[in-house]
Image (spheres, helix red, strand yellow):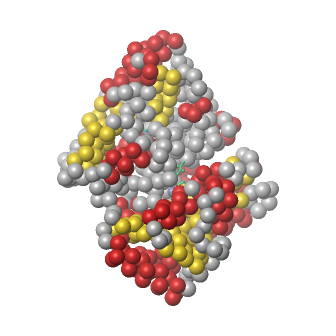
């Protein structure tokens, strides 16, 4: 489970080691309550339990000025830093690889202001997504992002990874809803790009560089988000399909019939459904098992209107024969239960064995053929399985090859094969989870050398000493 066990060739960078003097200096900035030196396993290990480092210091600032003072000292002393939010990232990006200091955003968790007229929230980066959602919900708004990790992930982590999730089909990607951001650079400079203006064409949109930068350029401390109105009626249908082609047909019909009220289009295969059923005890509302399941959600303002549209949609689906079974949620609780089957795939598969996790975007008709190919290359690996699920509207397929324990042979069969195929099909090797430690060396499969060179130049501008989240996002094996 050691970071350098999965990547034995990875060498520690030439950063200084923390001294007692450094710890005293940091304590002077954030106080005793902002310093942890014991029981750091949670900060050192990723959610998947696949990589871990051995930091001996976690610093949790309480203000932007404290973040700036901490980073300034780290930069002067050449101490490496990993910004950490809720530590739910899935690519080994949020943990130290060696002894990097963890800068946790957990105490920067204030929701500063909600403008109920404009539908804008201003908050700090350490607010848990669920808390943000509950708070804006009191004013009739919702956050334009939702994902299964909502109870643990922070809004700053969502921005740093540019998380996708379940509602992209409805609200678009998160970056479109970000009005302003404040960021601290490694030299302690505070880049104050806070704004609540929806229209602002006054030059370079620098905040966009930090969205998806995975802690490699600076630390996001504050954000303003534009909020959609909360839906009044939410409906859901779960369909059973015989093939992935049928899933695509269901998806096409649901877009045609439901138009503007569609808010999630998700699929999962049979291994995902049985794992969620058997391991987590969440029962499927369908009597029979199916090769594939398609889940469609609507969110709107008029229950009768939305219900009628969904019923018509389901009738058309059955007429066309692309689903052989299906059920509509009869209550809010049933709708929540159906979505929980989909949201709990990640924890259920984690309990099955060691997960090699892939999150790629592909032209929709190729989404599942790659999964079939991976099953084929793993056919002789004892105990191997592959579970696939994902966000159909974005061509984003998650597939988790699983072996009983970490198996270097299995890994060598999957990689670089998967990346070569994705590149051949002109997809993206990371649709929404980011690059982190695990994908960094494969960046060339999705980015032209000219783009990688520009990314390196930008990294040098913001972080000339390379202290911010080393070994992540950009290739470390060149
Ligand atoms: P962390 O994991 O702590 O950090 C992630 C990265 O961001 C690291 O590189 C870290 O250094 C950096 N970072 C964190 N905070 C800051 C900051 N303030 N400033 C600068 N850099 C920072 N992802 C999706 O895209 N879609 C999904 O549907 C989805 N579902 C998930 C379901 C489950 C059950 C789990 C466990 C994860 C899921 N994820 C999903 C992945 C994960 O939740 C997201 O990547 C999330 O955005 C990470 O937020 P976090 O606060 O946990 O960040
Ligand atoms: C999801 O859509 O469930 C998440 O991205 C998590 C995962 O891929 O496992
Ligand atoms: Zn996802």
Front residue of 72 and 63: 63
Give the vertical position of 159 relative to 8 (above or below): below
Q: Position of residue 438 (x, y in %)?
A: 59, 45
Q: Position of residue 465 (x, y in %)?
A: 44, 28
How many labels were placed on the picture? 0
Front residue of 444 and 108: 108
Residue 306: name its quadrant: bottom left
Give the vertical position of 417 relative to 158 (above or below): below
Q: Is 229 displayed left or right of 452 in the figure?
A: left
In the picture as drawn, the residue positioned furthest to the bottom comes out as 319
Residue shown at the point (42%, 42%) measured from the top left = 128
Front residue of 287 and 116: 287
Q: Position of residue 161 (x, y in %)?
A: 45, 46
Q: Position of residue 463 (x, y in %)?
A: 41, 32
Residue shown at the point (30%, 55%) measured from the top left = 141
Q: Is 30 displayed left or right of 93 in the figure?
A: left
What is the quadrant of the C terminus in the image? Answer: top right
Q: Is 99 displayed left or right of 168 in the figure?
A: right
What is the quadrant of the N terminus in the image? Answer: top right
- Asked whether residue 424 is in view, the answer is no
Residue shown at the point (53%, 59%) measured from the top left = 340
Residue shown at the point (55%, 82%) measured from the top left = 322
Residue 69: name its quadrant: top left
- Asked whether residue 190 is in view, the answer is yes
């Amino acid at each position: 489970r050691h970071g350098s066990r999965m990547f034995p060739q990875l060498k520690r960078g030439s950063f200084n080691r923390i001294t007692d003097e450094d710890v005293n200096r940091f304590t002077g900035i954030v106080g005793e309550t902002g310093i942890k030196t014991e029981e750091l396993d949670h900060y050192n290990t990723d959610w998947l339990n696949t990589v871990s480092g051995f930091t001996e210091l976690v610093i949790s600032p309480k203000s932007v000025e404290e973040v700036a003072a901490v980073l300034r000292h780290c930069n002067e002393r050449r101490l490496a830093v990993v910004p950490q939010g809720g530590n739910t990232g899935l690519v080994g990006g949020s943990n130290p690889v060696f002894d990097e200091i963890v800068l946790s955003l957990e105490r920067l968790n204030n929701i500063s202001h909600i403008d109920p007229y404009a539908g804008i929230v201003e908050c700090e980066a350490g607010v848990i997504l669920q808390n943000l959602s509950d708070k804006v919900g009191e004013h009739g708004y919702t956050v334009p992002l939702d994902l299964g990790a909502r109870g643990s992930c922070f809004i700053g982590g969502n921005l740093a990874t540019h998380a996708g999730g379940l509602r992209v089909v409805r609200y678009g990607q998160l970056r479109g809803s970000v009005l302003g951001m404040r960021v601290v650079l490694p030299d302690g400079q505070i880049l104050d790009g806070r704004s609540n203006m929806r229209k602002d064409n006054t030059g370079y949109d620098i905040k966009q560089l930090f969205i998806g930068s995975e802690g490699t350029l600076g630390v996001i401390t504050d954000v303003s988000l534009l909020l959609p109105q909360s839906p009044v009626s939410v409906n859901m249908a779960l369909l059973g399909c015989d093939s992935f082609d049928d899933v695509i047909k269901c998806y096409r019909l649901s877009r045609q019939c439901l138009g503007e009220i569609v808010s999630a289009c998700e699929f999962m295969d049979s291994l995902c459904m049985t794992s969620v059923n058997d391991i987590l005890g969440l029962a499927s509302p369908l009597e029979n098992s199916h090769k594939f399941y398609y889940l469609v959600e609507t969110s709107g303002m008029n229950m009768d209107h939305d219900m009628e549209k969904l019923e018509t949609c389901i009738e058309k689906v059955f007429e066309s024969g692309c689903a052989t079974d299906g059920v509509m949620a009869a209550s809010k609780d049933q709708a929540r239960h159906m979505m929980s089957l989909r949201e709990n795939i990640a924890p259920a598969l984690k309990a099955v064995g060691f997960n090699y996790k892939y999150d790629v975007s592909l032209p929709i008709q190729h989404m599942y053929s790659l999964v079939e190919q991976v099953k084929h290359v793993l056919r002789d690996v004892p105990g191997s399985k592959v579970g696939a699920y994902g966000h159909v509207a974005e061509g984003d397929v998650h597939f988790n090859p699983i072996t009983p324990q970490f198996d270097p042979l299995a890994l060598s069969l999957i990689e670089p094969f998967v990346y070569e195929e994705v590149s051949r099909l002109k997809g993206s090797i990371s649709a929404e989870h980011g690059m982190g430690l695990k994908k960094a060396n494969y960046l060339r499969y999705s980015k032209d050398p000219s783009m990688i060179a520009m990314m390196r130049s930008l990294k040098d501008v913001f972080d000339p000493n390379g202290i911010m989240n080393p070994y992540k996002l950009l290739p470390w094996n060149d």
